[in-house]
Amino acid sequence: MTINDLINKLNMEIVSNKVNLDKSVAGVYVCDLLSWVMSNANENDLWITVLTNINVVAVAMLTDVACVVIPESIEIESETITKAENEGVTILRSDMSAYEICIRAHELLREF
């Protein structure tokens, strides 16, 4: 599955521009403790977090996750969006809860 598939199937909002929507998504990871994400997220995971500060972009780059998804339509700091765009990190937003995103993304991954 690609990020673009995820966006289209789950009706997600693209927050950061200038990103590669053809990047593969291989798994789902949910965590808000950045040090834990750095140690445990896998390359090409869809990372779901409620955190919206600039450090999210750094962790996304270190772990090479496919994209970051912010649940529940949480507002994202403009500094974070700018940094994500400059670094090529895809940030998406959804009105769904983290739980619902997990379930639906897991189902989609099984289809691909």
Image (cartoon, rainbow, N blue to C red):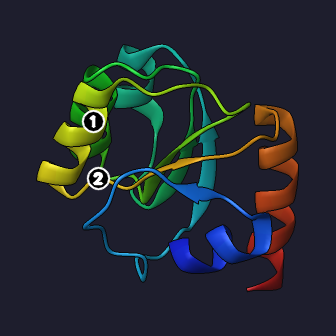
Quadrant where the C terminus is found in the figure: bottom right
Q: Who comes first in sequence, dot 2 or dot 1?
A: 1
The percent position of residue 24, horizontal first and vertical second, equals: 47, 76
Say which quarter of the image contains residue 21: bottom left
Label 2–label 1 contact, CB within 8 A: yes
Residue at x-position 69% and y-position 76%: 8
Element assignment for label 1: helix
Q: Which residue is mark 2?
A: 89
Q: Is residue 17 left or right of residue 88?
A: right
Which amino acid type corresponds to the residue marked 1 in the rendered image?
A: Val
Residue at x-position 74% and y-position 64%: 11
Whether residue 1 appears in this view of the structure is no
Whether residue 112 appears in this view of the structure is yes
Q: 46 or 27: which is nearer to us?
A: 46
Q: Real-space Cα distance between discs 2 and 1?
A: 7 Å
Say which quarter of the image contains residue 76: top left
Say which quarter of the image contains residue 84: top left
The percent position of residue 18, horizontal first and vertical second, equals: 25, 67
